Amino acid sequence: MKTVVVYKSISGFTKKYAEWIAQELRADLSEIKKSDIEILHKYDNIIYGGSLHAAGISGINIIKNNLKKLRDKNIIIFTTGASPPKENTISEVRDNNFSVEEQKQIKFYYFRGGFDFSKLNFINKILMTLFKWKIQLKRDKTSDEKGMLAAYSKPVDFTKKENIKELLEYVRLLK
Ligand SMILES: Cc1cc2nc3c(=O)[nH]c(=O)nc-3n(C[C@H](O)[C@H](O)[C@H](O)COP(=O)(O)O)c2cc1C
């Protein structure tokens, strides 16, 4: 079976997972571009990774808008975020990004990425500064929120190769 890993990554966390997955599965690897949809037709398994931005998976519309055309493919989506991988957060992200029908056509994974403010572009720096102020104004901050605030001055990297194990097992069993 031919497999491709395509991804969209701003500060490199999603890219790292995409590279690990491609290496392990001996799959082709590419950063996603709109024009890639035609190329994706060459593959049986399409793995897409994009980072979480305000609970949305970046770049996911390229895949979502083409789900009908890709109905004979195995589609695996992963997203990375700064938040810990809690079950309710993961199902919220899945349900926010995919309808019930879409969820039947895809397999979804969440991997913890990291946060590096210095690597963000101007717009994302503004957005994340607003988010920081919002957390700072909260009286009772959760430990995750405190951790997030600390990460603005000291980048955090939670990526771990072992996180992709389940995805690899799933893809290896596909026929
Ligand atoms: C504008 C913006 C919004 C974000 N929103 C979320 C979010 O809703 N949930 C989350 O867990 N992480 C959020 N993050 C953190 C990123 O998803 C996280 O740093 C991710 O691992 C970055 O991956 P990348 O380097 O591949 O882009 C946000 C980051 C930015 C810049």
Image (cartoon, rainbow, N blue to C red):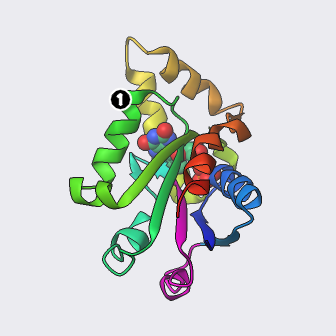
Q: What amino acid does circle 1 point to?
A: Asn
**Which percent across, then down, holds residue 31?**
63, 71
Q: How many marks?
A: 1
Q: Is residue 8 magenta?
A: no
Q: Is residue 129 visible?
A: no
**Which percent across, then down, holds residue 10?**
62, 58
Q: Is residue 42 magenta?
A: yes
User: Label 1: which residue?
Assistant: 88
For the residue labelled by badge 1, is the local secondary structure a helix, a strand or a loop?
helix
Q: The N terminus lies in which quarter of the figure?
A: bottom right
Q: Which residues are magenta?
A: 32-51
Left or right: 168, with 89 as reference point: right
Identify the residue at horizontal 72%, vertical 31% (top origin): 154
- Classify 105 as above or below 163: below
Choose between 18 and 165: the one closer to the eye. 165
Q: Residue furthest top?
A: 140
**Few, some or many C-alpha atoms within 10 Å of disc 1 (few <14, some 14-19, many ≥20)?**
few
Identify the residue at horizontal 41%, vertical 37% (top origin): 90
